[in-house]
Structures are given as C-alpha cells and as structure tokens.
Amino acid sequence: MRVSPATTNHSTSTLFTVVSSGCQVGSMPAVVQTQTVALNRLSELFKRLGSAGAKILSVTPVGEDLHPVAIAASAPAPEAKPKPVTQAPTPKKKAHADVPVNTYKPKNPFIGTVANNYSLLKDGAIGRVQHITFDLSAADPELNYLEGQSIGIIPEGEDAKGKPHKMRLYSIASTRHGDDMGDNTVSLCVRQLEYKNEAGEQIYGVCSTYLCDLEPGSKVKITGPVGKEMLLPDDEDANIIMLATGTGIAPMRTYIRRMFENRERETNGWTYKGKAWLFMGAPKTANLLYDEDFNSYQEKYPDNFRYTKAISREQQNTKGGRMYIQDRVLEHADEIFSMIENPKTYVYLCGLRGMEPGIDEAMTAAAEARGMDWAEMRPQLKKAHRWNVETY
Ligand code: NAP
C-alpha cells in the first residue's frame, strides 16, 4: 500500500478510523460503517471494503477526528478523495460541563442518613464487604451524580494527631436513579480494610470500618460527587469492556444496571443495544459481588451481556498459578482486540492497581501477535476516552 506523506508520520500501530458506505453486511441494506484499524492493517481493510463494493469516505487517526488523513492506497483503492467526516465517528462521552462535580465540599458536607447496610458476601467468603445506601432526600441543593463517579465520606472521630478525619473517596455503586429508582439515594460497595502492620498487629481501616459498622438511621458526612474518568458514553450502541477486581466492581454495577436492570430500562430513557463484557476477579466464589444479578442479566440478554469470572483461589491459570483477570484477558485477547478495533468500544478498569501491569502484558502479547505495538496504541485509546482506568 502506498500512503501519503501525512500517514507516513505514523507508526505501524497508529490507529485509524475508517468510515465507509455502501457495504452490504449480510442481508442488511447498505450502511455507513466505522471501523478502527492499525496503519499496518489499513491495506487489508481497503481490500475487504473494495471487494464488497464499499466506498471509503474518510480515514482519520484516532483522537484526531477533525483532521482526516489523505490516503492513496493501491487497488482496490478507496474512491475519490477522502472527505472530512461530517458526523462524529467516535461516540463522545458526556460533555464535561453537564457532569455534576463537588456539589458538597469537605468544609460543607451534606449530612446523609443510612437507609440500609448489608453484607454482599456468601458463607465461606474472605473478609467483609457491605452494600451501604444513603438517603439523600434532604439535600438542598440536590446531590445528583452519574454512573462512574465517586462520593467522599468523612468518618466520625479524630486521627492520631487529634484532628478530624479526612475525607475518603468511594466509587458509587448505584445508578443516578438509586437502587430504588427514587432519585434520592446513593449506594456504595465497601470492603473493610484489614491488614497486619510490621509489628504483627491487626489493623482495620478507619473509614471502611466506620462505614461497614453503620446502622440504618445513622447520620453520615458526604461530599462530592467527583470524577469524570469513568463516565459511560451516551451511545446506546457502544460496546463496553469492564475489568474489575473486588470492590472495583462498583462503577461496573452502575453501568450494568443502567443497561439491563428492568426498572432502569423502563424509565431511564436509554435503551442499551451494544455488547457489554464484564471480567470480574475475586478470591473465592463466595466473594463474587452482585453475582446473581449479573448471571440473570446474562441469561436475559445473552447477545448483549457476557460475564467472565477469574476466581483466584479456586481456579488456576495455564501456568498453574492463581487465576487473575489478566489471565482471562489473555485467553480472550483476540476477541477483545477485535472489539477494540471498533471505535464504539470502550474499556474500563477498576480495582487493584496491581492488575494493570498484568493486563498491559496480556494486551502487549495480543498486539504483538497482530504486528501491533500496545505501548503506542494505549495512549491513543486513552486520548479517545476509550481506555479508562481508576485503580487504587
Ligand atoms: P478482593 O475481593 O480481595 O479481590 C481482589 C482480587 O484480585 C482477588 O481475586 C485477588 O487475588 C486478585 N488480585 C490480587 N493481586 C492481583 C493482581 N496483581 N492482578 C490481578 N488480580 C489480583 O478485592 P478488594 O479487597 O475489594 O480490592 C479491590 C481494590 O480495588 C482495593 O484496593 C480498592 O481500594 C480498589 N478499588 C478502587 C476503586 C477505584 O479506584 N475507584 C474502587 C473500588 C475499589 P488473590 O487475593 O487471591 O491473590
């Protein structure tokens, strides 16, 4: 394939968005199609589109949607000169101006009331994880939030220096409508932090213990909401790949409820039609969070929701080690890559920071197998808001 000087500035792994029209997909009528491929696979795509009789409208480096690159490919070449994309090829996430942020600050928190607080774990699970719901109905101004945001909690009491405790952030686990769809609650999914210090003493986290022990009716200082990294795109056709460990499931639960929970679908005015794929990492089956809900969505929407579990202390990876989600990512790397080549696909990671290198390794190997360079691709996806990470 010959490329114009504009494209030669890019490496073979640079991703391009190709918009074409007139291509028949199965028995479907002619459509405008948008695909993402690396530079070194453009030629292959042109051939495929050419033999299907498609017309290429534009070729644009990912993240530079407004500056389509002029192309000159060998036969079967795209017809005529590529035109600028008139409709945005990549669905945009919510404009940041619409996102509620810091309605309540630490100096002036909202005092919420605990509506309920129950365990999410089954018998035999490790540790303690609670689902905690706060009533926000007294908030003036209202404490509105979106899926993917966090709120702050200021625990009662003082630290070792006698100062009031500082605020801690927690990912929200309920949709903007709340678990009861009343538009006036927010829920969290909280693990009680516990570890042994250097002296061998058992230490419990200050705020997580405070939250896990709360009784219904208790008053709690709440701040926020904050966070714009993990917002869902508005596009009902977007594909969403979710990689979560432990309580990192919180934002994923909000997305999945918004997509598949009956009452959400009936009332949220957003009818999800894309493909959602959840990879969930937990130490034991008894530690899987919201597992029944996810199983039931998968049963009800088999074409739209897929749920893959990595149960580290019950399953083994191919090397005989603990099964982590990066091992599952590696198993399905080809499919994940094909999905990522579609510009409507967004990836979200939440949970342990330790999973990131493993996931990068899995993606690097998968990219290499396709002659691509993950280290170059990832920043491009990030720039296009398609690789979203919130890990602690
Ligand atoms: P957990 O229930 O203990 O589960 C964590 C799972 O991840 C276990 O199966 C664990 O395996 C596995 N794991 C351990 N090391 C790993 C690695 N390097 N790569 C991949 N998987 C690994 O989890 P948790 O205690 O709830 O922890 C969740 C973490 O997410 C916490 O650190 C929390 O602060 C963070 N979090 C972040 C956000 C956010 O950023 N917004 C929100 C919620 C939670 P083994 O233990 O069997 O080795």
Image: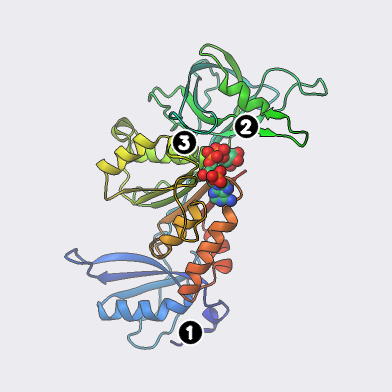
Q: Earlier in the sequence, mark 1 or mark 2?
A: 1
Instruction: Name which residue type carries label 1.
Output: Val
Residues marked 1 and 2 touching at CB (< 8 Å): no
- Residue bearing mark 2: 193
**Residue at the spot 32% in from the left edge and 40% down from the top edge:** 295
251 vs 344, nearest the viewer = 251
> From this viewpoint, is residue 89 visible?
no
Q: Is the C-beta of the residue carrying label 1 under 8 Å from the nearest atom of ligand 1? A: no
Q: Position of residue 169 (x, y in %)?
A: 62, 33
- Who's the residue at 27% across and 44% down the image? 301
Q: Badge 3 is on which residue?
A: 287
Q: Is residue 392 visible?
A: yes
Name above or below for residue 26 compared with residue 165.
below
Asked if the residue at label 2 sits under 8 Å from ligand 1, the reply is yes
Query: Secondary structure under badge 2?
Result: loop
Ligand 1 is located in which of the four quadrants?
top right
First in sequence, mark 2 or 3: give its number.
2
Q: Which mark is residue 3?
A: 1
Q: Which type of secondary structure does the marked residue at label 3 adopt?
A: helix
Q: In the figure, is residue 283 to the left or right of 154? A: left
For the C terminus, give its image quadrant.
top right
